[in-house]
Amino acid sequence: MLRSYALNRVLQSLVTLVLVSLVVFAGLRALPGDPAIALAGAEADDAAIEEVRRTYLLDEPVHVQYLSWIGRALQGDLGESAQTGLPIGEIILSRIPVTLELALLSLLFAALIGLTTGVIAAVRRGGPLDWLGNGVSLFGLSIPNFWLGLMCVLVFAVGLGWLPASGFVPFTESPLGNLERLIMPAFVLGSGLAAVLMRQMRSSMLDALSADYVRTARAKGAGEFRVVAVHGLRNSLITVLTILGLQLGTLISGAVVTEQIFVLPGFGKLMVDAVFTRDYPVIQAAVLISAAGYIVVNLLVDLLYSVVDPRIRVSGGAA
């Protein structure tokens, strides 16, 4: 049953990825203007423009262009940057580790803060801790990333001088320097997600703690810690996992802004720079990689459902 459920989800993800690739390809082709002129530059002569057409197969039918692009992408060849001439695959591989590290630190921060405060607020419903947790979560939801990032730079970098204002140091070169430059961006990026997780965790825990099986466990003499951690928390994680999967898109879009503020050479900044320079091959590849990452993470979340709640894989496998 688990194998059938996993196979079903994988097939759905593959179909979604194909549709996304079509949308990405068609979307760039639908932009106003001649892409050959945009790639060659406004000052280019007719010969240079025709050379660009041949290089990027712009003189071929659209379906031939798509099949050529997706075929090379499946082989790991994402083409070359129109601005630098460097292989796009190498450019993305050099940028992704920065964004992945930022995203993982943000997720860690959001999970630790959001889940912990959500459980405490549910257990202490109506008390001071509940009011405090709800107030902090509303604050996190209301503050835009760009404003919070600028305020962090102003207070902790310019005012107090505790942390560097921008830049990036690889972890292999200096673990401490790496952490110093990522702690503020991770806090900024994870604050909104932490607020969402807190409110969702509180709501799910309140539903779980009022269920019949929890009352039965308490009637049998189970301790409060066991009731909360085993019976309440596990059954609340289904909804939280859904939120984590859906919030990945927000995390990626937030990383674009955060990396610009803190001048991090990550994947988000690469996309912004490619848009400003009208580097269409990089934009096309970057959007495809982003969509593929989003789909893969949601697939992993779906598969994790079956571990947390076996009822899901039973119904999914039977569908």
Image: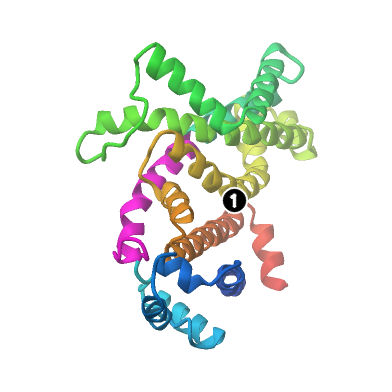
Name which quarter of the figure residue 85 lies in. Answer: bottom left
Tell me: residue 123, above or below residue 92. Answer: above
- The residue closer to the viewer here, 211 or 53, is 53
* Residue 175 visible in the shown view: yes
* Residue carrying label 1: 245
Count of labels in the image: 1
Question: Going by the picture, which residue comes out furthest to the left?
Answer: 173
The verdict on residue 84 being magenta is yes
Where in the figure is residue 118, as x and y percent of width and height? 64, 28
Please give the name of the residue rendered at 64% of the width and 53% of the height, measured from the top-left corner: 309
Residue type pointed to by label 1: Gly
Overall secondary structure of the magenta section: helix
Where in the figure is residue 18, as x and y percent of width and height? 57, 75
Please give the name of the residue rendered at 70% of the width and 19% of the height, measured from the top-left corner: 130
For numbered disc 1, what is the local secondary structure? helix
- The residue closer to the viewer here, 11 or 278, is 278
Quarter of the C terminus within the rendering: bottom right
Quarter of the N terminus within the rendering: bottom right
Magenta span: 81-108
The verdict on residue 97 being magenta is yes
Please give the name of the residue rendered at 33% of the width and 27% of the height, measured from the top-left corner: 180
Tell me: residue 279, above or below residue 64. Answer: above
Where in the figure is residue 294, as x and y percent of width and height? 54, 57
Tell me: residue 27, above or below residue 177. Answer: below
Please give the name of the residue rendered at 73% of the width and 13% of the height, measured from the top-left corner: 127
Q: Is residue 16 left or right of residue 79?
A: right
**Mark 1 crowdedness (10 Å alpha carbons): few <14, some 14-19, many ≥20:** some
Where in the figure is residue 157, as x and y percent of width and height? 38, 19
Q: Is residue 149 left or right of residue 96?
A: right
- The residue closer to the viewer here, 280 or 72, is 280
